[in-house]
Image (cartoon, grey):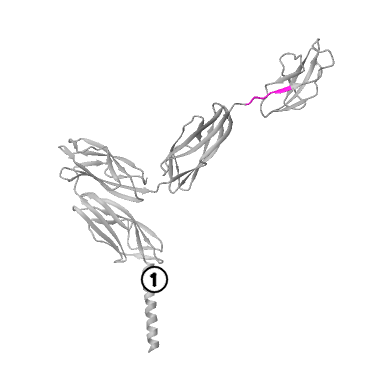
Amino acid sequence: MRLLCWSFTLVFVVSSLFVSSHAAATQLTFNPTALRFGEVVLGRSETLTVTMTNSGSSSLTISTANVSAAAYTLGSLTLPLTLAAGQSTSFTVTFAPAALGFASGSIAFNGTLATLNVHGYGESSQSLTANPASLAFADTTTGSTATMLVTLTNAESSSITVSQVSTSAEFATTGLTLPLTLAAGHSFTFTITFSPTLLGPALGTVKALGSSNNVIAYVPVTGTGVATGQLTLTPTSVNFGNVNVGTTASQAGTLTASGASVTVSSVTSNSSEFAFSGLSLPITIAAGQSAAYTTTFTPQSSGSASATITFTSNSSNPNASESLTGDGVGAQTYSVTLSWNASTSQVVGYNVYRGNSSGGPYSKINSVLDASTTYTDSSVANGQTYYYVTTAVNSSSEESAYSGQAQAVIP
């Protein structure tokens, strides 16, 4: 009897483990986890997309999808459908309210295997028409504001007055003074803003209300709040050192985005002696990526100079800056002073010759005969090497052979 009871218990435990493992292997998940359509005017519809994933460890065949509310319909989903482990598929759900008020429901797959909840609200018809009929804002960083224009038109035969405007969280209106009365056939354009404070998608509505709080215009609005990027400068300060007046020195720099992409819209310098180059603006730097640039210093006069280069962007530090310093110095001039022993012959003067190569050829550099035994050459250039010889000239203008060669390295 003990052996039989022990055997029965083992079978029961193994069976329980098998059932639990099977349930985990057929888990079906949705992204987003629920659909919220917001307010939709009667006679119109709104469609959202859902991604369905088999997050279990074995394949799963979806054979049925039961919608509990008539206002919702499935699209882009052909059943039966088999999803391998980890595989996903997308489908659409459309909300077309037939009555005023809230309309909630669910979509059940394979009976009670997985359920997607759906929510919406049927709103009354409009007296004013909106153009565009809905607004979809581009991804907007938290803490910033995006704007779009919308125009309301009175297509009725009599005037209509907008008494109030109702907006969902993170959306607002500007440029609209209330009450606003539109004569028949007239239009008015104003701005709708999106200022996300949270990450992720935001769904809402902008409603124009009449004197009885009835909805006379309705604009669905959507947007997504994204993380604010950080802009880092390397280096944050540069010292160009001594730079000759009228010449240009360059230094390399790097802009790096972290956390999220960053768009650099402009760069300014508060000194004309310091400049920025190397990037075409505006430029968007992806998160984790860098962009190289160059700063230059072109002193216009002698003395110390400083400046701040400011980078304007949509990052969390929208005015990141780099400090630049340098010293302008006057251009240096060089000269070579030559001297030689006097000739033992009767001479009236000397000529001085210069060449760029040892042994010549040489060119005479004195314009008139030099009666002394010294000469200063002030036409030399920095970084060059010169070779000098002299000759003696008598009263009959007869010139001696070249003297021994002297070398001068500048400086």
290 to 60, vertically: above or below: above
Relative placement, left or right, of 118 versus 369 is: left
Q: Please, what is the three-letter code of the amino acid marked with disc 1? A: Ser
- Judge whether 144 appears above or below 351 on screen: below
Q: Quadrant of residue 331?
A: top right
In depth, the one of 12 and 173 nearer the eye is 173
Would you place residue 272 above or below residue 192 in this image?
above
The image quadrant that residue 154 belongs to is top left
Q: Which residues are magenta?
A: 332-337
Q: Position of residue 64 (x, y in %)?
A: 30, 64
- Res 326 visible: yes
Residue at (15%, 45%) from the top-left corner?
212
Residue lying at the far front of the rendered structure: 304
Identity of the residue furthest to the right in this view: 344
User: Is residue 203 shown left or right of residue 283?
Assistant: left
The x and y percentages for residue 273 are: 51, 30
Say which of 333 and 315 sits in front: 333
Check if residue 390 falls in the magenta segment. Answer: no
Report the side of 370 relative to 61 (left or right).
Answer: right
Q: Quadrant location of the C terminus?
A: top right
Q: Quadrant of the N terminus?
A: bottom left
Name the main secondary structure of what is drawn in magenta: loop
Along the line of sight, the residue nearer the viewer: 249 or 129: 249
Residue 408 pos. (x, y %): 73, 27
Q: Residue at x 50, y 37 (%)?
A: 323
Residue 298 visible in this rendered orientation of the protein:
no
Q: Is residue 338 toward the left or the right of residue 324 in the image? A: right
In the rendered image, residue 334 lying in the magenta stretch gets the answer yes
Q: Residues within 10 Å of mark 1 (few under 14, many from 20)?
A: few
Tell me what residue is drawn at x 57 percent, y 33 percent: 249
Q: Which residue is mark 1?
A: 21
